[in-house]
């Protein structure tokens, strides 16, 4: 990549993303191996230490001191009573994306001082800017194919994409030749992303259709009728010529909505302040097939996992059951009595660990990314905390910037597990070229974060300089985020020989 001081994109303005004190507890990867002590699973009464089960005697537990119940907990208990203990995979899915009471459906802001954690783009602008330089560099080396699609999975507040677009605009890339595509499940976050990138918040397509229908209704009528839609109940005024006519009109309009969804699979569309169209989707499969740059920052870590343990009787899966005893919570961990589909599918003969965590969704998603890159062209950059297939027990929760028991008050805390980069690479190794994972410190250093820091320091006040230095240390210090976070890139196999001569920026120059 060379010295960034030679690049024409040097931006003197300082973009402050956060005024938070930058302490390790503010990011989800703050836990270290030394602190994450491995415990034993038990079917008896237990309490939880940092993400582990520790058996205790009943005399050590205060009777009737269970954690508060949540609406989601009631649903989970009903499901367990009906069909038996849940896998950790099913539990994570319910806790995070349950449409009624899940963590991401609650509408709260999980970032910043009032949330549960902070991500790298929110800490310092240099992170997003250097990722933007990487995007431009690799896209340019591959021939600058247009139109360019930027696809981000789980874009948070939109801060990373905002920084990337600002960098691309410095290089003259903006407008209709560039489009942004967000894969997002949270309606609340999609509004925050739109406000950050577009400056305004518009209603999505479903609401537009209903509002257009309400114009047809009698504005003087006070009667409301509830009709089901694919997202829930929608209330609107009945038409003066009768409920039957209103129902018929409603059915026709809903058919139009469904037809629109078949043709245009996004649920929201807007335009960035730079003039580029931006779309929102529920699933990656809905994003148009074209040359794309795929980005995923702290996305894979929230994909559900199966936890499997080796016992004297063989491999058994960790399940979650109702705790009707004196345990601190209403749920507890148990082991399956026999092998499960997960133990039969995911355990490899050469496995040496006593406990593993496997995310089938992460593997499927990587395969989809590889397929799109192979057939349509493109590159992918995954940024997350994880390991190379050696760690075993990383499932945990975060709430209010602190570790939280995953079984306590489900739906109120973020659940996460370290990404197994070795497993992901193994799924797609023969279809695409992979680089990494390298540590975040290595990647940012290779991209020239020191040069960017020095340039910004020349154009800001003393308080801003302190914030920049603090952010720099948080991103690169090995004791903070520098080594815990990793970068992994995918490239088309067709450019293998080219990449040998021109390896991707960020993944070379220094050895970890």
Image (cartoon, helix red, strand yellow):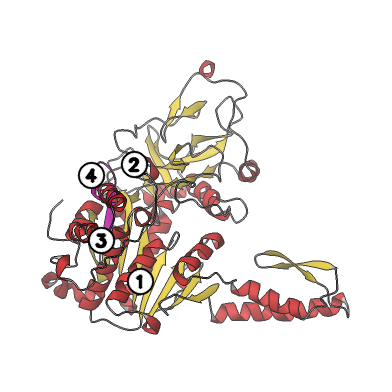
Which comes before the other along the chain, label 1 or label 3?
A: 1
Position of 7 with respect to 104 (left or right) is left
Using the numbered discs, state the Cα–Cα distance from disc 3 to disc 4 in whole angstroms.
28 Å
Provide the residue designation for mark 3: 459
Give the residues in magenta. 474-488
Extreme-front residue of the structure: 461
Which comes before the other along the chain, label 3 or label 2?
A: 2
Dot 4 crowding, Cα within 10 Å, few <14, some 14–19, many 20+: some
Which comes before the other along the chain, label 2 or label 1?
A: 2
| Mark 3 element type | loop
Provide the residue designation for mark 4: 478
Provide the residue designation for mark 1: 165
Q: Nearer the viewer, mark 1 or mark 4?
A: 1
- Foreground pick, 424 / 175: 175
Residue 410, image x, y percentages: 55, 42
Using the numbered discs, state the Cα–Cα distance from disc 3 to disc 2 in whole angstroms.
27 Å
- Residue 371 visible, this orientation: yes
| Mark 4 element type | loop
Which comes before the other along the chain, label 3 or label 4?
A: 3
**Is residue 484 in the magenta section?**
yes
């Amino acid at each position: 990549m060379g010295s960034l001081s030679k690049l024409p994109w040097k931006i003197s303005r300082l973009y402050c993303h956060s005024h938070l004190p930058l302490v390790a507890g503010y990011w989800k990867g703050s836990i270290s191996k030394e602190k994450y002590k491995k415990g034993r699973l038990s079917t008896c009464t237990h309490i939880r230490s940092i993400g582990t089960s520790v058996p205790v005697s009943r005399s050590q537990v205060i009777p009737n001191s269970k954690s508060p119940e949540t609406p989601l907990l009631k649903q989970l208990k009903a499901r367990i009573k009906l069909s038996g203990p849940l896998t950790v995979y099913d539990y994570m899915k319910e806790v995070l994306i349950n449409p009624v009471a899940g963590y991401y459906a609650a509408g709260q802001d999980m970032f910043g001082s009032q949330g549960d954690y902070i991500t790298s783009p929110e800490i310092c602008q240099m992170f997003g800017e250097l990722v933007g330089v990487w995007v431009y560099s690799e896209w340019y080396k591959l021939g600058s194919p247009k139109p360019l699609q930027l696809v981000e999975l789980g874009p948070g507040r939109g801060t990373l994409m905002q920084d990337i677009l600002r960098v691309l605009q410095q290089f003259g890339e903006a407008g209709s030749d560039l489009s942004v595509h967000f894969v997002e499940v949270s309606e609340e976050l999609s509004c925050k992303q739109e406000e950050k990138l577009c400056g305004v918040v518009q209603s999505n397509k479903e609401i537009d259709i209903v509002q257009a229908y309400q114009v047809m209704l009698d504005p003087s009528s006070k009667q409301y009728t509830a009709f089901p839609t694919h997202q829930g109940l929608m209330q609107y005024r009945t038409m003066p010529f009768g409920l039957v006519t209103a129902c018929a009109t409603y059915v026709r309009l809903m058919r139009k909505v469904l037809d629109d969804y078949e043709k245009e699979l996004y649920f929201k569309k807007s335009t960035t302040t730079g003039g580029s169209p931006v779309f929102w989707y529920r699933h990656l499969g809905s994003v148009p097939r074209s040359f794309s740059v795929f980005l995923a920052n702290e996305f894979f870590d929230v994909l559900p996992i199966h936890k499997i343990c080796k016992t004297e009787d063989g491999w058994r899966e960790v399940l979650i059951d109702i705790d009707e005893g004196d345990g601190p919570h209403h749920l507890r961990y148990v082991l399956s009595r026999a092998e499960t589909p997960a133990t039969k599918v995911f355990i490899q003969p050469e496995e040496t660990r006593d406990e593993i965590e496997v995310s089938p969704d992460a593997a499927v998603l990587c395969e989809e990314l590889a397929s799109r890159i192979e057939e349509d062209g493109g590159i992918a950059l995954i940024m997350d905390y994880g390991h190379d297939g050696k760690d075993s027990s990383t499932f945990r929760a975060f709430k209010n910037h602190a570790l939280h028991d995953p079984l306590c008050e489900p739906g109120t805390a973020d659940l996460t597990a370290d990404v197994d980069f070795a497993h992901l690479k193994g799924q797609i190794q023969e279809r695409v070229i992979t680089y990494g994972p390298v540590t975040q410190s290595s990647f940012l250093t290779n991209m020239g974060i020191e040069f960017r820091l020095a340039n910004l320091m020349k154009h800001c006040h003393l308080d801003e300089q302190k914030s920049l230095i603090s952010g720099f240390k948080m991103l690169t210090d090995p004791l903070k985020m520098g080594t815990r976070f990793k970068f992994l890139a995918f490239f088309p196999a067709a450019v293998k020989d080219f990449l040998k001569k021109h390896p991707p920026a960020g993944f070379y120059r220094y050895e970890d």
